[in-house]
Amino acid sequence: MTVWRDLVGQEPTVETLSRAVRAEASMTHAWLFTGPPGSGRSTAARAFAAALQCPEGGCGECRECRTALDGSHADVKVVATEGLSIQVRDTRDLVQESALRPSVGRWRVIIIEDADRLTERAADALLKALEEPTPRTVWMLCAPSLEDVIITIRSRSRHVRLRTPSVHAVAELLERRDGVDAPMALHAARAAQSHIGLARRLARDEGARIRRRDVIAMATKIVGVGDAVDAAADLAQIADEESTASTAERDAAERSRLLETLGADPTARTQPPHIRSQLAALEKEQRTRATRHARDMVDRSLVDLMSVYRDALVVRLGSNVDLINPDAIDRVRSLGAVFSAEQLLRCLDAITEARERINANVPPLLALEAMALQLRVPRDLNL
Ligand SMILES: [Zn+2]
């Protein structure tokens, strides 16, 4: 057992990080982890933090390792934003904290999971700490790609790039770590296109599998304009359902915890002004979180939808590449039959454009409708 066990398919990264743990000369105070979503950026950062704290260099068993991995180590701080951005006030607190010596561990580690969500001012505030590093403090920033982080931060950090793990590596992890049976693990890893977190959810949650299947089925069902409008509405609704399911319970818990902290009566119909303003602030934060979450869900559905056109293109071109949706082969074949390669590429472009527009704050339904209109098939495929 080692701290690196859950970091699958990333041998070069493990090698680099273990070397830094073994030899302090190759240690740096700022690291930047990049890699596609679900490849294990934050898993890598946490494992690295654990290895740095562990007297054995990352045994995976001792108290230091366990607490660093589960996020409860006193000297390992993990910042994961739920909002759309990380604000300057949040970074200022971190910078102050980073100036302190480690309290129990060998290093003080600060992991920022979504460094791509730092606002410009927040990044500037952070920069000061990176320019004048405190001796036993290590910053670990995670982002999808180098371009997502401002250049001044990039140039002061050491870069570690994670790759997309193979489908088989992800399936093996699901079997070993989560006890998923082999055929399901393989199906989920393939359908999630090696996104580890998503694969785990598909393997364990039937609702998620059904929602994915519904999205895949859309590709062959859009014939007329009415179908396109319906498909767009369905996509938006699937995202909303998924988002509400996962946030409602948490929102309510946060609210009662806040009222408890303020010593208010949770059953009272109206609250005194100072409590109302606190509640309003919390609700605002929760709305921001819900927006981000719903947007992430739409994006995920669009990635699923793209996979059908990608498969159809593979079939159309007769490429010798594994399909992402072998279980939807009929759909894939019919799409490959009614569309030329060029048209399939155009469908993929339409989906990419919708993703970009939603990312740029265009209302999702609007972007989805424009997209769905471009995905119309020439006739009913009866699937
Ligand atoms: Zn250990």
Image: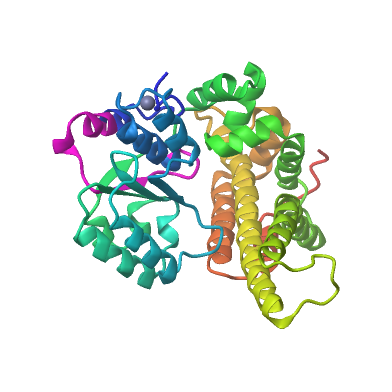
* Residue at point 60%, 34% (across, down): 199
Q: Among all residues in the image, which is located at the extreme bottom?
A: 273
* In this picture, residue 158 sits left or right of residue 119: left
Please check the rendered image and state whether residue 275 is part of the magenta-colored stretch, yes or no: no
Q: Looking at the picture, how far across and down is residue 322, in whole percent?
A: 54, 27
Q: Among all residues in the image, which is located at the extreme left?
A: 25
Residue 177 picture quarter: top right
* Residue at point 63%, 57% (across, down): 293
Q: Looking at the picture, how far across and down is residue 195, in whole percent?
A: 53, 38
Residue 176 picture quarter: top right
Question: From what the image shows, is residue 88 above or below residue 234?
Answer: below
Residue 308 picture quarter: top right
* Residue at point 77%, 62% (across, down): 229
Is 200 in front, or is 358?
A: 200
How many numbered dots are placed on residues in this image? 0
**Quadrant, the N terminus:** top left
Q: Which quarter holds ligand 1?
A: top left
Question: From what the image shows, is residue 49 above or below residue 121?
Answer: above
Is 364 in front, or is 349?
A: 364
What span is in magenta? 16-40
Q: Looking at the picture, how far across and down is residue 169, in whole percent?
A: 48, 24
Please check the rendered image and state whether residue 37 is part of the magenta-colored stretch, yes or no: yes
* Residue at point 66%, 18% (across, down): 181
